[in-house]
Amino acid sequence: MPIIKERYADNWDDIATRVKDAANWCCTECGKPCRKPGVKWLHFAFWLMINHPEWFSLTSEGEEQKPQRFTLTVAHLDQNPQNNHPSNLKALCAPCHLKFDAPFRQANAYTKQEWFGQLNLEDLNNG
């Protein structure tokens, strides 16, 4: 289920860009350099191959790295998209963000279902 944009600040894109700029467009967890918006994947891949060959290597399956793995995101450490205090925000590449959110995924799914007016099993049992 996609994110609920209404739960985020109107200036979320600006906030997220500041966090990413502060991290120099690198994941603060694994150190992976990530592609800035507007930079073509081919140009980024060439830059990566020359400047950071350790991140350009082939995966164990022999496939080239996928572009979305070099997307920098911003995580809310407390899982509250309305809490934009700098201490609650962390620049993470897409794989690290998925790993970070994994323990919260089920609770976040329930929150999204409730936001969209879908009943959960507890509501049905208590009704």
Image (cartoon, helix red, strand yellow):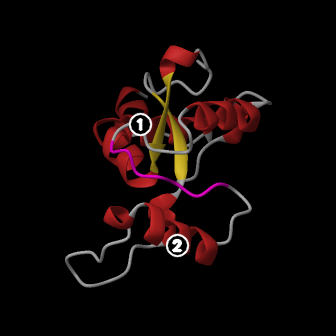
Q: Residue shown at 41%/36% (left/top)?
A: 28
| Mark 1 Cα shell of 10 Å, populated few (<14), some (14-19), many (≥20) | some
Residue sitting nearer the eye, 51 or 10: 51
Q: Secondary structure at mark 2?
A: helix
**Residue matched to label 2:** 45
In contact (CB < 8 Å): disc 1 and disc 2: no
96 within the magenta span:
no
Q: Is residue 106 visible?
A: no
Residue span colored magenta? 30-36
Snapshot quadrant of residue 10 = top right
Between 93 and 77, the one nearer to me in the picture: 93
In the image, taking residue 87 as reference, residue 122 lies left or right, namely left
Q: Is residue 31 magenta?
A: yes
- Amino acid type of the residue that numbered disc 1 sits on in the rendered structure: Thr
Picture residue at 52% right of the left edge, 24% below the top: 80
Residue annotated with mark 1: 28
Q: Is 5 placed above or below 61 here?
A: above
Residue 31: give x, y in percent of width and height.
38, 45
Q: Is residue 100 left or right of residue 127?
A: left
